[in-house]
Each structure stands twice: as C-alpha cells, then as structure tokens.
Image: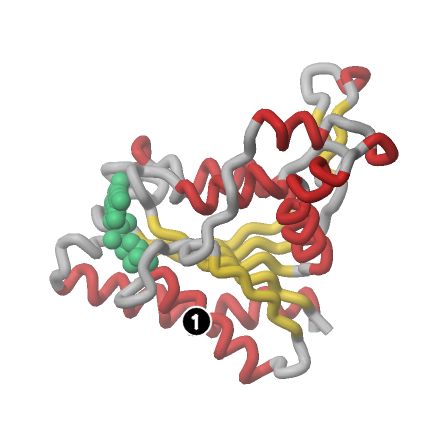
Amino acid sequence: MVTILQIDSSARKQGSVSRALSKAFKSQWHDKYSKDKFIYRDIGSTPPEFISENWIAAVFTPEDKRTGEHSSLLASSDLFIDELTEADIILISTPMYNYGMPASLKAWFDQVIRINKTFTFDLSRGDFPLQPVMSGKTLVLLTSCGEFGFAVGGIREEMNHLNPHIRSVSNYLGVTEHHELRVEYQEFGDKRHSQSIKDAHSSIPKLIEQIAKKYH
Ligand SMILES: Cc1cc2nc3c(=O)[nH]c(=O)nc-3n(C[C@H](O)[C@H](O)[C@H](O)COP(=O)(O)O)c2cc1C
C-alpha cells in the first residue's frame, strides 16, 4: 500500500485551479490503485500557526525536559511530521501568491522542517551541516499562476520564487524525486488559460503511470 499525503493550500475553494488539479490527480490515482491511502490536509482553509519564540524554545528543549506547555506548542508540528513520515508521495497543490508560496504553506513547512525530527545538524559536515532524516519520497507539485512565463526559459523565470523554493525545502522532507505541473494565465482568463488547464490535466494520467511504476 502506498500512502499519499495531499496538501491543498489555495485560500479559495470555489474556482481554485490548483485544487482542481490535485482533485483530478487523487481521483485518477484512486481509480487505478484503490487500496492506496490518502492523508488529507487542507491548509488553505485551516492554515497552520506561525512559529513563535516559544515554539523555537520548545524545539530546542531536550525531549525529557519539555513541559506540558512545550508539548502543546509542538502538537501540530508533531502531527504534521507523523503524516509526512507515513507518506511515500507528497502531493502539494498551491497557488502562486506574490511570486512565492502562500503564507499557509510556508507555515506548514516551518512546522514540519524541525531539528532532530526531519533534519539533523552537525558542524562536522563542513559547509553543509544540515542533513535530511528521511529519503526516497516523491513530490508532486501542482501550481497555478495568474500570469505566465514562469517555466525555465520563460519571460518570468526570474520571478518564480514558488517552484525553486519548494524544491529546495522539500529536500528536508526526504524528497528525492520531483514532478511538477503548472497552470498559467489564470488572470487573463483567455484561450491561453483554458489551453494551459487542458495541458496540465491531460498530463496527469502519464504522470500517475510514471510515478506508480516506482511503487506498484
Ligand atoms: C493574494 C494573491 C496574490 C497573487 N500573486 C500572484 C503573483 O505574484 N503572480 C501570479 O502570476 N499570480 C498571482 N496571483 C494569481 C493566482 O496565482 C491565481 O489566481 C491562481 O490561479 C490562484 O490559485 P487557485 O486558482 O488555486 O486559487 C495572486 C492571487 C492572489 C489572490
């Protein structure tokens, strides 16, 4: 059985292009592999809390010295990390907001990427002291943007702080394989947008086939 952690991060439910992509991916995966398990987190509707000074203090307090207050501060983080640990595949759908990820998704990453849980830190490793604890996970990143040209070589490649940022931080989730689909032109609402939606949706079956090969 394969476990897929699905994270939707659009603030909107009505008309969300990115949620439509993850919904299609999930239903097509489920049609083929009905025994696989989906864990669902709607962080767009229920954003994780931002980390705080007390949260950081709790993280750096050794487990056997943590108070009840520390434990409750870390409860969401513990739950999100448990969900991540169980997942073979991480399916993230996200809009581009201000050329990057929504604050809700960043808050989730901040809760999940945690010392001695998802990464270790050791200065004897030299210039790269951080190392992920987990490995072998696959990330499927489904995005939607209002403008266009964010792909490599596109006219707004330099302004795309969404995909490169998620690729960098996903290393600490244990991701070693990445797949991405992107819809663009949402704000233009023209034929280019409908074509972009069509292209992304028509890529899903092949993407599922490619990923499933590794697990089934
Ligand atoms: C607060 C906000 C900021 C946005 N910033 C950008 C942006 O920087 N670049 C862009 O191309 N589109 C931007 N958009 C457009 C969204 O990326 C686009 O509407 C996308 O389809 C939203 O995802 P959703 O359809 O899943 O809700 C922004 C939209 C909102 C609401």
Q: Is residue 183 visible?
A: no
Q: Find residue 44 and report its image quarter.
A: bottom left
- Single out the residue that lies furthest toward the right: 64
User: Is 204 situated left or right of 175 in this image?
Assistant: left
198 vs 101, nearest the viewer: 101
Give x and y (percent) for residue 31: 54, 84
139 vs 37, nearest the viewer: 37
Q: Find residue 159 and report its image quarter.
A: top left
Asked if 57 appears above or below 167 in the picture, the reply is: above
Local SS, label 1: helix
Give x and y (percent) for residue 20: 36, 68
Question: How busy is the neighbourhood of tag 1: few (under 14 within 10 Å), some, or many (20 plus)?
Answer: some
The quadrant the N terminus occupies is: bottom right
Residue at left 63%, top 38%?
A: 113
Q: Is residue 188 visible?
A: yes
Give x and y (percent) for residue 185: 20, 54
Residue at left 61%, top 51%?
A: 177
The quadrant the C terminus occupies is: bottom right
User: Is 18 situated left or right of 185 in this image?
Assistant: right
Q: Find residue 131 and report its image quarter.
A: top right
Residue at left 58%, top 82%?
A: 32
Give x and y (percent) for residue 69: 70, 37
Residue at left 35%, top 54%?
A: 11
14 vs 99, nearest the viewer: 14
User: Is 160 situated left or right of 139 in this image?
Assistant: left
Q: Amino acid at mark 1?
A: Lys
- Single out the residue that lies furthest toward the front: 68
Model colouring:
secondary structure
User: Is 213 situated left or right of 43 in this image?
Assistant: right
Identify residue for label 1.
23
Asked if 76 appears above or below 213 in the picture, the reply is: above
Asked if 88 appears above or below 118 in the picture, the reply is: below
